Amino acid sequence: MASPAERSECEWIERIKADGAVPLLEPENCPNGWASPPGDKFMVRGPDYLTSKVKIPAEECLLKPLGFDWIKGSTKIGEILKNPNSRVRKTIDDEFPTGDKPFVWAFNLQVPSKDNYSAVVYFVATEPITEGSLVDRFLRGDDGFRNSRLKLIANIVKGPWIVRKAVGEQAVCIIGRALTCRYCVAENFFEVDVDIGSSVVASAIVHLAFGYITMLTVDLAFVIEGQTESELPERLLGAVRFSDLNPASAHSFEPSSDETAGSLHSSLPTRLWKSIGQGFSQFLHPGAQEDGSTNGSAHVNGTSNHEECPEDVKKCKKSLIGVAKRLIFIASAALSFD
């Protein structure tokens, strides 16, 4: 039988898990929800990787899953755990008004979009961090060290061909080399805000994928890359699965004024890639406009271009698919840092 302290711990963790915009469900069936996939779904560097280049299925994660937020704001959302009104921070502050607080990790994926969506996954450490370990050095290190080590592994479990092709069977990326990361470290938490819009290639892929987000099941794992024999085999920090997310279900989150500096900037390259991504989605997603909605180029003089010149449309679509394939090739090369 669990002790009162253990029951109390379970209660606050379960409360955080359950209170987000989308529910915690089973990995095999989690529409518009999130789940914790098993570690062995991901391949990591094995003990002899430096000589053999052999990867092995990962063991259990080092951190315990704590929660998932699907949120949006008037500006880009960052430094969530510094905000005392954020739901995870508030729950922990209320649960532990005095004494030691649990150490929480947050990975905030900032999606480039006009509604400033963020997918935030939280984990909690259940064991003390060993002094001198790779995790300890990562937390104590500078941003340069963190940028060279923090790795994302992404699996598209379910999704359209174009998205699976763009990401690959298992995409591996040293996040800080490809994207701008902002780290927020305090006594009882670590947060990294990953600006996907900082890379025009990554932004284009995400804008393409966002058109299919209600049809995607994605597994993500976070790893501190092992680069020496003593740091192998690699261990997952944590992993999350989200599936068939509905943009309409995202909760609104308004950051404090000091968290919005620079978040209103939108570069021309990002807007350009956004347009390309949205264009691919419209051409490669049949029926996307079948609800009767139109845009400025869909009709000319009241007549559908598609009806006037189907051969030209077919050639245009074929050309765009060719461009999409080239973009996928470039993106795959740009994101392969393993």
Image (cartoon, rainbow, N blue to C red):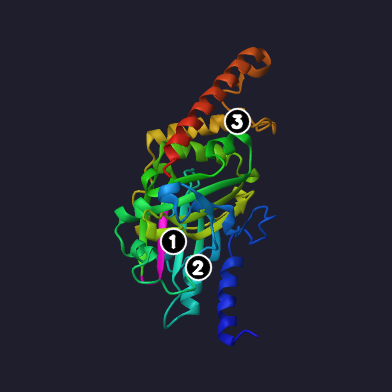
Report which residue position mark 1 lands on.
Answer: 80
Stretch of the chain drawn in magenta: 187-193
Residue 213 percent coordinates (x, y): 60, 44
Q: Are marks 1 and 2 in contact (CB under 8 Å)?
A: yes
Please indicate whether residue 216 sits to the left or right of residue 80 in the image. Answer: right
Report which residue position mark 3 lands on.
Answer: 282
Give the residue at x 52% y 33%: 277
The quadrant in which the C terminus is found is top left
Report which residue position mark 2 lands on.
Answer: 88
Residue 180 percent coordinates (x, y): 37, 47
Mainly helix, strand or loop, the magenta region? strand
Mark 1 falls on what kind of element? helix
Q: From the viewer's side, name the closer residue of 72 and 244.
A: 244
Query: Mark 1 packing: few (<14 Cα in 10 Å), some, or many (20+)?
Result: many
Q: From the viewer's side, name the closer residue of 26 and 257.
A: 26
Q: CA distance from mark 2 to mark 3?
A: 37 Å
Mark 3 falls on what kind of element? helix
For badge 3, the amino acid type reads Gln
Mark 2 falls on what kind of element? helix
Marks 2 and 3, the one that precedes in the sequence: 2
For badge 1, the amino acid type reads Ile
Picture mark count: 3
Q: CA distance from mark 1 to mark 2?
A: 9 Å
User: Which of the 4 image quadrants contains residue 333?
Assistant: top left
Give the residue at x 50% y 47%: 115
